[in-house]
Image (spheres, rainbow, N blue to C red):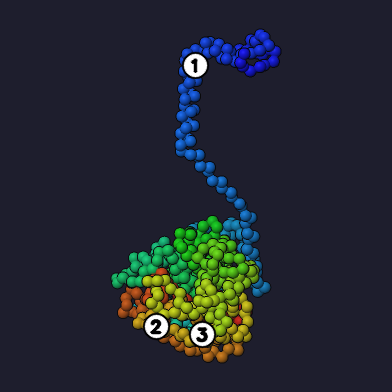
């Protein structure tokens, strides 16, 4: 008989023993079918049909895709930056975590000057309530012979606190102070009520006539940083009490810094990553926050500055520099310049940034420096001296050696070798391209003028030990002609105190960028001590 041979005794499905030595499967199956109710057979049949149809359908559609496997690798967090106290700094360490000594910035009072009767650095401003753009000529008045007069050194623990007098730092004189104040008043008037400077919408703050020259809104964080740096560079902090033309500069700075902090994420990045060139925004935000902390020692800014510097250092390409985004494969000299400036400010503020980040920036400078005239390229040494532009935007502007000025400045910051012959060769390159305001020949380049002015001031300025000043004197004369004479005057109404955005990079930052960076350029006269005199800037916070 057909079937499967089984051993002697088996149990029936219901537990009854089967008799005999052999078992016929077909007979057993027939018996079970006879015993099974018709409805049970129907259920089994339909289940089998559904199973077959499902199998056929999957065969036609193909195999179901395998979901991707995501592997998350959690890297250990970088060690926190140390805050080291210089030998001449008597202050104690500021708590890292916010507590009673570190209040929430949003709870800070509008003005928080020290009321210590023995602290004469906090005397309210004694100048008249006038608009230097519309009022008296500051050059003939003694009221503004000290920029930023009226605030107080942050917490009384500032390093090297002092005041800036007219003419200090290299024949700037009253004219430079007047022009600087004009620029700051225009910036203050065009600050958004929320605290930032709107690159393309600043004209909403205009009174009477409308100022032209919009930029890109993607750079609001960056131009806000530049505008705040202009106030900080003149000695105004969130504690300043000066009122000029009805504007309290201290409130302007405070609103700007608090807005900037609100743009910082938990990783420390300023402005987010929506902007294609977001490292420009972050570098300028970091530079600004470190300057504010350095000038005031205020715990309101310590944590924000520390997080920003940590992100900046993580974003650097190992052994090299920076570019538009996080740890890029390619680097450029422009972004690297702002990042090194931010590191320098962080170091001055007491953060131990170490030498590795500086050395990476210097490595990039050396990599991009050609060996004939020692000009510095933008991304490779072969493009040294060639135009960096955006097609249809600024390619009609003259080329300038801005990258050479940046490279020269980084070399001085990192190496500090005044006798390096490369520095002299680079200074000669800059001297062959003096500032010239000419809209017809499209020679305007505020960005180049800023970096070249700072580099030449450090290398050959009036405070440079042993310098002949032959480079600086000629550059200084041309710079004054290019900037002082072209600032908007009283007849320009609401635009008074600003500069037109008609320069090589004005299409990106607009009038706010133009006014902020030109004001910063003029502040080099009294803001910076020479890099070869101990690498320490004169602290002039109020």
Q: Position of residue 353 (x, y in %)?
A: 62, 67
Quadrant of residue 215 in the image? bottom left
CB within 8 Å, label 1 to label 3: no
Point out the tag, 3 or 2, that comes first from the N-terminus: 3
Q: Position of residue 276 (x, y in %)?
A: 46, 63
Residue tagged by mark 2? 437
The residue lying toward the viewer, choosing from 490 and 441, is 441
Q: CA distance from mark 3 to mark 2?
A: 19 Å
Residue tagged by mark 1? 40
Image height of 473 relative to 134, above or below: below
Q: Which mark is residue 106?
A: none
Secondary structure at numbered mark 2: loop
Q: CA distance from mark 1 to mark 3?
A: 98 Å
Secondary structure at numbered mark 3: helix
Q: CA distance from mark 2 to mark 1?
A: 97 Å
Q: Position of residue 371 (x, y in %)?
A: 57, 82
Tag in front: 1 or 3:
1
The residue lying toward the viewer, choosing from 434 and 367, is 367
The residue lying toward the viewer, choosing from 144 and 49, is 49
Quadrant of residue 512 in the image? bottom left
Question: Is residue 150 shown left or right of residue 1?
Answer: left
Q: Does residue 127 appear in this view?
A: no
Residue tagged by mark 3? 429
Q: Quadrant of the N terminus?
A: top right
Point out the tag, 2 or 1, that comes first from the N-terminus: 1
């Amino acid at each position: 008989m057909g079937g499967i041979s089984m051993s002697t005794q088996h149990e029936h499905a219901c537990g009854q023993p089967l008799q005999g030595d052999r078992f016929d499967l077909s007979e057993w199956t027939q018996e079970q079918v006879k015993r099974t109710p018709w409805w049970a057979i129907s259920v089994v049949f339909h289940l089998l049909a559904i199973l077959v149809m499902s199998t056929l359908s999957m065969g036609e559609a193909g195999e179901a895709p395998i979901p991707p496997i995501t592997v998350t690798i959690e890297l250990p967090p970088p060690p926190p930056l140390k805050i080291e106290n210089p030998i001449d700094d008597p202050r104690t360490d500021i708590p890292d975590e916010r507590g009673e000594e570190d209040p929430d910035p949003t709870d800070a009072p509008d003005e928080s000057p020290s009321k210590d009767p023995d602290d004469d650095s906090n005397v309210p401003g004694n100048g008249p309530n006038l608009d230097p753009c519309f009022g008296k000529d500051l050059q003939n008045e003694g009221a503004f012979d000290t920029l930023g007069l009226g605030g107080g050194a942050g917490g009384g623990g500032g390093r090297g606190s002092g005041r800036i007098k007219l003419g200090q730092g290299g024949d700037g004189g009253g004219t430079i102070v007047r022009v600087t104040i004009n620029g700051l008043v225009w910036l203050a008037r065009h600050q958004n009520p929320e605290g930032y400077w709107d690159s393309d919408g600043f004209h909403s703050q205009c009174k009477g006539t409308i100022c032209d020259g919009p930029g890109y809104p993607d750079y609001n964080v960056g131009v806000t940083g530049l505008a705040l740096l202009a106030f900080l560079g003149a000695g105004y902090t969130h504690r300043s009490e000066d009122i000029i033309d009805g504007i309290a500069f201290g409130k302007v700075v405070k609103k700007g810094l608090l807005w900037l902090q609100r743009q910082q994420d938990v990783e420390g990045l300023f402005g987010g990553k929506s902007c294609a060139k977001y490292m420009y925004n972050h570098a300028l935000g970091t530079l600004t926050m470190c300057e504010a902390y350095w000038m005031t020692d205020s715990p309101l800014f310590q944590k924000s500055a520390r997080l920003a510097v940590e992100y900046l250092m993580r974003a650097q390409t190992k052994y090299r520099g920076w570019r538009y985004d996080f740890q890029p494969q390619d680097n450029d000299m422009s972004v690297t310049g702002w990042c090194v400036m931010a590191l320098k400010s962080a170091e001055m503020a007491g953060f131990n940034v170490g030498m590795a980040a500086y050395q990476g920036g210097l490595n990039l400078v050396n990599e991009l420096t050609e060996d004939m005239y020692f000009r510095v390229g933008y991304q490779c040494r072969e493009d040294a001296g060639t135009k960096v532009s955006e097609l249809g935007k600024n390619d009609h502007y003259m080329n300038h050696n801005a990258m050479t000025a940046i490279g020269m400045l980084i070399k001085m910051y990192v190496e500090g070798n005044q006798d390096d012959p490369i520095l002299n060769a680079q200074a000669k390159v800059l001297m062959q391209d003096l500032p010239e305001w000419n809209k017809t020949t499209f020679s305007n380049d505020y960005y180049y003028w800023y970096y070249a002015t700072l580099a030449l001031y450090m290398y050959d300025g009036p405070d440079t030990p042993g310098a002949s000043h032959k480079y600086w004197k000629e550059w200084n004369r041309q710079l004054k002609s290019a900037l002082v004479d072209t600032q908007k005057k009283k007849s320009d109404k609401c635009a008074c105190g600003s500069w037109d955005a008609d320069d090589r990079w004005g299409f990106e930052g607009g009038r706010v960028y133009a006014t902020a960076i030109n004001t910063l350029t003029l502040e080099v006269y009294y803001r910076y001590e020479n890099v070869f005199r101990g690498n320490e800037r004169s602290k002039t916070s109020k």
